Amino acid sequence: MPAGYLFDMDGLLLDTERLTLDAFLDCAPEFDLDPGEMRAFFMTLIGSARTQGEAMVRDFIGPDRDFDALDLAWQHHSQRRLAAGIPVKPTVAETISALHASGAVMAVVTSTFGDKARHHLDRAGLLRCFRTVIGGDEVPANKPDPAPYVQAAEQLGVPPQNCAAFEDSDTGITAAARAGCFAVQIPDLRPSARAFPDVGQRFATTLTEAVTTAQAHFHHERRRQGRSL
């Protein structure tokens, strides 16, 4: 088994990427934006840190639109949609619960600010399962830099190479692989024409499948190392 399990949050544990996209599209009439162009642009935002994403949005809307007003409207629509509850991705609740019950050491590694991430995980009923949550405002550099994953592994007391990392975005999976983790990508929202980064990751369609893939890998590696002794 992996000595540590490291999970992205938005688009991996929580189905908040789609909610955030819908909230963005809610802003279209007020700011005279084309929904099709907004949807295509949003796909390029996936996995970006707050500062980088803000710069990208400013460039997308152009100088004639008020970024601060758009940001407030986007937050308003997001909060309105979140009021109904934090959506959890399929197989996540049962997979995380089973790992927690087995004594697995787990962390969340997200570009979302730490306090906001912990609040969302708490509302989703998942926070108690994780030993630590690493937010995008709590690291020296954001994904695709490996720093967030290195920091999470250090806080768990586990070398990154003994950890399994799970990501939906290209940016995140690159960070996990660069940190030395066994990386499994579960693609969610992304530009359809974009090629996946070639960083040695495995692929899965659900978190349950991804965790099983990681556990099988570490089991195989232990058996292989045992035979070589």
Image: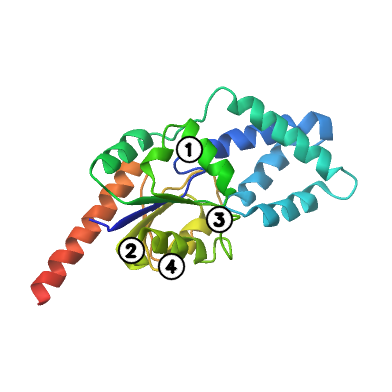
Instruction: Mark 4: give few (<14), some (14-19) or many (20+) Cα within 10 Å.
Output: many
Instruction: Mark 3: give few (<14), some (14-19) or many (20+) Cα within 10 Å.
Output: few
Which sits earlier in the primary sequence, circle 2 or circle 4? 2
- Give the SS element for disc 2: loop
Between marks 3 and 2, how big is the CA–CA gap?
33 Å
Find residue 107 and name its label.
none
- Give the SS element for disc 3: loop
Where residue 211 appears, as percent x and y from the top left, is 30, 48
Nearest the viewer among 215 and 38 is 215
Give the position of the C terminus as an image quadrant: bottom left
Q: Which residue lies under the disc numbered 2?
A: 158
Query: Does 191 appear above or below 75?
Result: below
Instruction: Mark 1: give few (<14), some (14-19) or many (20+) Cα within 10 Å.
Output: many
Q: Give the side of residue 36 with respect to residue 109, left or right.
A: right
Between marks 3 and 4, how big is the CA–CA gap?
23 Å
Q: Residue at x 39, y 45 (%)?
A: 130
Q: Amino acid at mark 2?
A: Val
Query: Does 62 appear above or below 218?
Result: above
Q: Give the side of residue 198 with respect to residue 190, left or right.
A: left
Between marks 1 and 2, how big is the CA–CA gap?
23 Å
Q: Which residue lies under the disc numbered 3?
A: 194
Q: Nearer the viewer, mark 3 or mark 2?
A: 2
Q: Which residue lies under the disc numbered 4?
A: 179
Between marks 2 and 4, how big is the CA–CA gap?
12 Å
- Give the SS element for disc 1: helix
Q: From this viewpoint, is residue 191 visible?
A: no
Between marks 4 and 1, how big is the CA–CA gap?
24 Å
Pointer 3 with pointer 2, Cβ within 8 A: no
Where residue 228 appears, as percent x and y from the top left, is 11, 76
Outermost residue on the top side: it is 84
Q: Amino acid at mark 4?
A: Ala
Q: Which residue lies under the disc numbered 1?
A: 121
